[in-house]
Image (cartoon, rainbow, N blue to C red):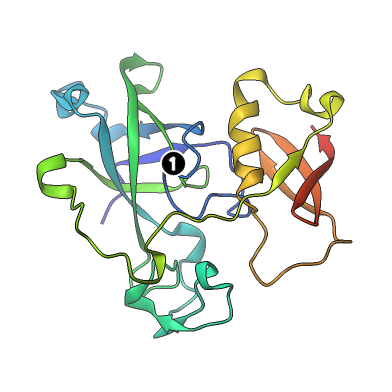
Amino acid sequence: MTPVAHIRSDFATKFGVPRQAGLVEALRAAVVFAPPYRAPEALRGIEGFSHLWLIWEFSQNKGTGWSPTVRPPRLGGNQRMGVFATRSPFRPNPIGLSCVKLERVELDTPEGPALYVSGADLVDGTPILDIKPYVPYADCRPEAVGGFAGAAPEKTLTVDFPPPLLERVPADRRTALIGVLAQDPRPPYQNDSGRVYGFGFAGLEVRFTVAGGVLSVVDVMV
């Protein structure tokens, strides 16, 4: 399959990316189409939908192989489940699926049509294989059972973000970044209170520690 577009997001690497779409609604991203697909008419009518399905490729996991069982972060990374009972990136075919909110459509950017979305859980540059509208009457199943992921994660951290460091973050990215940090971006098997973690966000390097349910930002570097 050929990617029709790529995502533009604030995440330089997969560390820090929310584990599901929609967990941090303040995150903003853009879907920028590849040259063969920059046809405005291909988006005709899309503005009538509030949400979209993005079908994409786990490009950072290509060629890494797959396993019939994986350790979901939701279960603390200690219990194995069948790969087809999870959304693990280590799959026979590295395909991801995300439901995002469509914020606006711009047809005449310098790179052609673009879709601006919120709540995306994708690394910058991720190839988009297809885009489909979210259709509530068909896609929404209130009676559905979610197995071991039956409810949104309850664990959130209190974020201690010193004002001088927060001021280094663009004002329109602060709410999203705090939301990402509150979700605890660490791997579930890492719980070292003395360790300094870091990830790239919006062109910055954000470093933090976690102890006693409090995430403390210790540095923000350009």
Query: Residue 162 lies in what quarter of the image?
Result: top right
Image quadrant for the N terminus? Answer: bottom left
Query: Residue 131 lies in what quarter of the image?
Result: top left
Q: Residue at x 44, y 38 (%)?
A: 119
Among all residues in the image, which is located at the extreme top?
Answer: 108
Image location of residue 89, percent across then percent down: 44, 66
Image location of residue 19, percent across then percent down: 50, 55
Query: Residue 86 lies in what quarter of the image?
Result: bottom left
Q: Nearer the viewer, residue 126 or 37?
A: 126
Q: Secondary structure at mark 1?
A: loop
**In the displayed structure image, the side of residue 14 where residue 62 appears, left or right:** left
Among all residues in the image, which is located at the extreme left?
Answer: 137
Image location of residue 169, percent across then percent down: 72, 26
**In the displayed structure image, the side of residue 19 where residue 34 appears, left or right:** left
Q: Is residue 128 above or below residue 190?
A: above
Q: Is residue 181 above or below residue 85?
A: above
How would you rate the neighbour count of disc 1 (Cα within 10 Å): few for under 14, some for 14-19, many for 20 or more? many
**In the displayed structure image, the side of residue 179 where residue 52 appears, left or right:** left
Q: Is residue 69 above or below residue 59?
A: below
Q: Residue at x 22, y 60 (%)?
A: 144
**In the displayed structure image, the side of residue 210 where residue 87 appears, left or right:** left
Q: Nearer the viewer, residue 77 or 120?
A: 77
Q: Residue at x 19, y 48 (%)?
A: 140
Q: Nearer the viewer, residue 96 or 144?
A: 144
Q: Which residue is mark 1?
A: 120
Q: In this orientation, does residue 114 appear?
A: no
Q: Is residue 33 above or below residue 184?
A: above
Q: Nearer the viewer, residue 26 or 66?
A: 26
Q: In this orientation, does residue 73 appear?
A: yes
Image location of residue 108, percent across then percent down: 32, 14
* Identity, as a three-letter code, of the amino acid under mark 1: Ala
